[in-house]
Image (cartoon, rainbow, N blue to C red):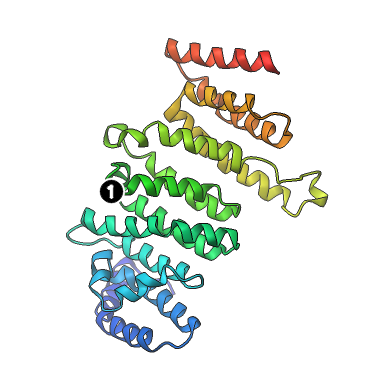
Amino acid sequence: RNMTRSGESKALQQLALLLPQVVSLMQSLLSSADNQDMLQRCLQALAGWCKFGISLSTLKTLPFYASVKELTRSPTLCKGACELFAAAIKTTSYPAESDDTLMEVVDDLVALQPLYMEAQAQRNDDFCEGLAMLSRALMARSSKFIASGRGQTLQLSHFCLEMVAHPNKGISEIAMEYWDELDFVDMSARCEPMRGPIYQALLEVLATRCAPYPAGFVDWDSCEEEEEEFHMFRRRIEEALLNCCVCLRAESLAILCRMLGAAGSNWEAVEALLFSIGAIGGELATQDRPGQRQQVLASVTELLSKY
């Protein structure tokens, strides 16, 4: 049945009172669990209870924190552990989480990059998806902190570039949301590499590793990938390309034209770059500064002279 807001609020308050008992129960289960299925269920339960008061700071005080942190390295339990950390990061704390608390998670994530690369090679998508979700949660919670360049935050952003290029489109889209959150941070609040240079790298990843047709593509009847899925993903890529163009402006076209000139005779690469150029065309048309217009004209002239 439907519940009023006041009724829902009262129910949530009553559930929050049970949090100490839940934590105690989870501690007991985590310490005695003798199979991964039980551990996974415990992680899921804790993630669900985070909204009742388990913030990141609170999670760090719990006796099983070190054990949960270690599970982010597990090939089979990483995703569950990352979901718990992401839920805790999303939970509002008073006072707000300190930068040092967030930095610890950043450092831990960056340290997991070699395991991520192994997992991708082994097609362990759950492991990779867990790290992508946790990175997105960090950026959503404290985008200004991530954009500041402090500590290893810049390394985390470069790691997320690699996640955008993941062959699993679902993981790639999660990683793209990391960059969506960055767009809300004013340029004055970002370190220099998070203004232009990081978008140049993102533009290249999107155009050369995300946009191309499946390798060896002949037609959709013989392709393992669904045509509709491919084109839906390309629409998501278009949005990300536009965000790059908003930041880089005319330079985005110059970068794509340079890559096109080096693409050779590989039709998939050429087509993907032409698609990327088309995706940013509308944004480039809005450039009203003479210098920007001249740069666009120079890039278009060079493009037409080659094709």
Residue 263, image x, y percentages: 66, 30
What kind of residue is marked 1?
Gly
Q: Is residue 160 left or right of residue 265?
A: left
Asked where in the image residue 44 lies, by quadrant, the reply is bottom left
Q: Where is residue 227 in the image (x, y as percent from the top left)?
A: 73, 48
Horizontal side of 183 relative to 19 (left or right) equals right
Task: Please indicate, yes or no, whether residue 62 appears anywhere in the rendered image.
Answer: yes
Instruction: Tell me if residue 275 comes above or below residue 122 in the rendering.
Output: above
Is 115 rendered above or below residue 146? below
Closer to the camera in the image, 12 or 70: 70
What residue sits 29% from the left and 81% below the top?
Answer: 23
Tell me the residue at 34%/83% (across/down). 26
Indicate the position of residue 145 as horizontal and vertical percent values. Answer: 28, 46
What is the number of callouts on the image?
1
| Residue to which mark 1 is pinned | 151
**Given the current orientation, which residue lies at the most extreme left position?**
95
